[in-house]
Image: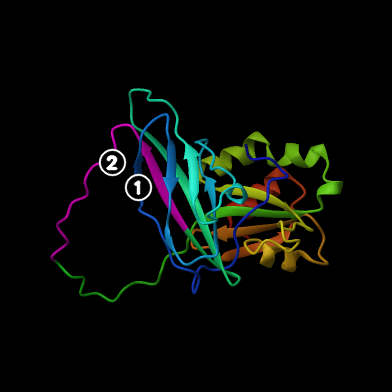
Amino acid sequence: MRTLITLLVFCLSAVGGPKLNIPLEIEAKPNTWAKIMPDTDAKAVVYFAVDDGPQPFPNEELKTPTKMVAYMPPDNGAEQRFRYVAVGCLNDELTITEFTIVVGKGKPKPDPKPDPKPDPKPEPPEPAQPIKFVVVIEETETAVPERAAFMYSPDIQALFKSQSIVWRCADKDAVNAKGEPPPDIARFLKDAKGKALPMVYLVDAKGKTVASKAMPKTVKDFIDFVKNKGQ
């Protein structure tokens, strides 16, 4: 599902990016196609399954490049929740948002009552965002089985799962159907030019690149790099 040759999406901060509005939770029926049409002015939207849920249908196969289509599993007698990440692209600017598709019982109704007590204290500084995405730019032709085994090592996969981190790899010469660098990874491809490959990038929940460096040599060093956010 998360193969080493799959193209990756995620780049700089979402500030100034396109409008991308998707409900936090969307209810879908089992054994049917869930269709998501966001409120967006993005040129294209790419979707990723955060967990091992139904995979989105490839965008390039759809007539509408901002739409998501995924086939939901059968009813198992319980509520099933599948998390997704959407990345909207417009003029080299990105917006990243998360949402959940709920199959089964559906979501509980939120409390409509707002908090009547305003906070008189000044707003504290925005806390540091967790690492949400790991981006790898590599030379696919020289990729070796040991590298795949490295990324799929139990310790690294356990870290990704425990912190809900999505990881993807892209070839340094990746292009789209028009022969151009895909806009959603163009900045990574540009940054990686002339550098020792593979390059690894840490991206936070708001789409900001937190750190980047040549791929660590050992599993321990890689895990420390992610856990310490490159510091």
Where residue 213 sits, quadrant-wise, is bottom right
Residue 26 part of the magenta segment: no
* Res 90 label: none
Using the image, determine if residue 229 lies above or below residue 219.
Answer: below
Does the CB distance between marks 2 and 1 fall below 8 Å?
A: yes
- Magenta stretch, main secondary structure, is loop
Per the model, the C-alpha gap separating discs 2 and 1 is 7 Å
Q: Residue furthest right?
A: 142
Where residue 145 sits, quadrant-wise, is top right
Amino acid of disc 2? Lys
Side of 202 relative to 95 (left or right): right
Residue 147 is situated, as x and y percent measured from the top left of the image, at 77, 42
Look at the image and tell me in which quarter the C terminus lies. Answer: bottom right
Q: Which residues are magenta?
A: 97-116
Mark 2 and mark 1 lie on one chain; the one further toward the N terminus is 1
Is 133 or 5 nearer to us in this picture? 5
Which residue is located at x 80 percent, y 38 percent?
146
Q: Residue furthest front?
A: 63
Amino acid of disc 1? Glu
Is 66 or 112 nearer to us in this picture? 66
Residue 93 is situated, as x and y percent measured from the top left of the image, at 56, 70
Side of 169 relative to 66 (left or right): right
Label 1: few (<14), some (14–19) or many (≥20) C-alpha neighbours in 10 Å: some
Tag 1's secondary structure?
strand
* Res 25 label: 1
Is 77 or 191 nearer to us in this picture? 77
Which residue is located at x 82 percent, y 53 percent?
139
Using the image, determine if residue 18 lies above or below residue 10.
Answer: below
Label 2: few (<14), some (14–19) or many (≥20) C-alpha neighbours in 10 Å: some
Identify the residue under disc 2.
107
